[in-house]
Amino acid sequence: ACGLSIPMENATYTAEARQGAFLNGARISVSKEPELKSMLISFNLDASSLARSERAGDFYGKVVEEARNMRATNSVYDLAAVADGRLGACILHHSRIWDVVAPALLIQEAGGVCTSLDGSPLKFDVTEEGIKANYEFLGGSRPACKRLIEIRNSLRH
C-alpha cells in the first residue's frame, strides 16, 4: 500500500497492490488518449554529467516534436498527475528509489506501466547500494510508454 499527499490541492492518492488507485477515495486511471500528440508529458532532469544531459536533451527534442506539450514541475506531483490521467507520462532521468517506489505502485494500479527509459523492468533494490542508485524512470499509459520507449531506443546514445 502507498499514499501520496498534494496539500496545495487537498489531494490524497492511495493505492494497494491488486486493489486499484484512488484520489480522495474515488478510483482513478491513467490517460485514455491513444497518441502522444493528444497528451501532456512531464520531463524531469536533475543536474548530472554533461553526457547524460546531452542524451536527455536529444530525447526531449524528439518527444516534444510528437507530444501535445511538455511540462516540468516536481516529480511526485507529476507522477500523481500521471496516475489520475492529467499527464500521459512522466520521464525522470535521475531519481532515487524514494522518489519512485510509491508512485510506481500508484501508476500501475491506475492501469499504467512503469519501466526504465529503455523499457527494461525496474528493479527496486533496498540494499545500501540500491538506496544510492540512480533510477531512470518512465511511468504512464501503455500507449504513451510504448511510443516513448521507441523514441528513446531510436537515439544513438
Image (cartoon, rainbow, N blue to C red):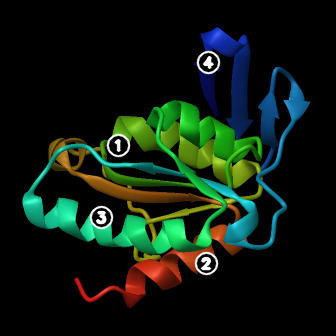
Q: Where residue 156 appears, x then y in whole percent?
A: 26, 89
Separation (CA) of disc 3 from disc 4: 29 Å
Q: Where residue 12 appears, x then y in whole percent?
A: 71, 19
Q: Where residue 77 appears, x then y in whole percent?
A: 56, 31
Quarter of the rendering occupied by the N terminus: top right
- Contact between marks 1 and 2 (CB within 8 A): the answer is no
Q: How many marks?
A: 4
- In the displayed structure, 72 sits above or below 61; it is above
Query: Considering the numbered disc 2 on the image, is that residue within a helix, a strand or a loop?
Result: helix
Which numbered disc, 1 or 2, marks the residue closer to the eye? 2
The residue singled out by tag 3 in the image is 57
The residue singled out by tag 2 in the image is 146
Q: Is residue 47 left or right of residue 101?
A: left
- Contact between marks 4 and 2 (CB within 8 A): the answer is no
Q: Which of the marked residues, 1 or 2, is nearer the chain's N terminus?
A: 1
The residue singled out by tag 1 in the image is 97
- Contact between marks 3 and 4 (CB within 8 A): the answer is no
- Residue at the (47%, 41%) spot, across then down: 72
Residue type at numbered disc 4: Ile
Residue type at numbered disc 1: Ile
Residue type at numbered disc 2: Lys
Residue furthest out toward the right: 26
Which numbered disc, 1 or 3, marks the residue closer to the eye? 3
Separation (CA) of disc 2 from disc 3: 20 Å
- Residue at the (31%, 54%) spot, across then down: 135
Residue type at numbered disc 3: Gly
Separation (CA) of disc 4 from disc 2: 28 Å
Q: Where residue 155 appears, x then y in whole percent?
A: 33, 85
The residue singled out by tag 4 in the image is 6
Q: Which of the marked residues, 1 or 4, is nearer the chain's N terminus?
A: 4
Separation (CA) of disc 1 from disc 4: 19 Å
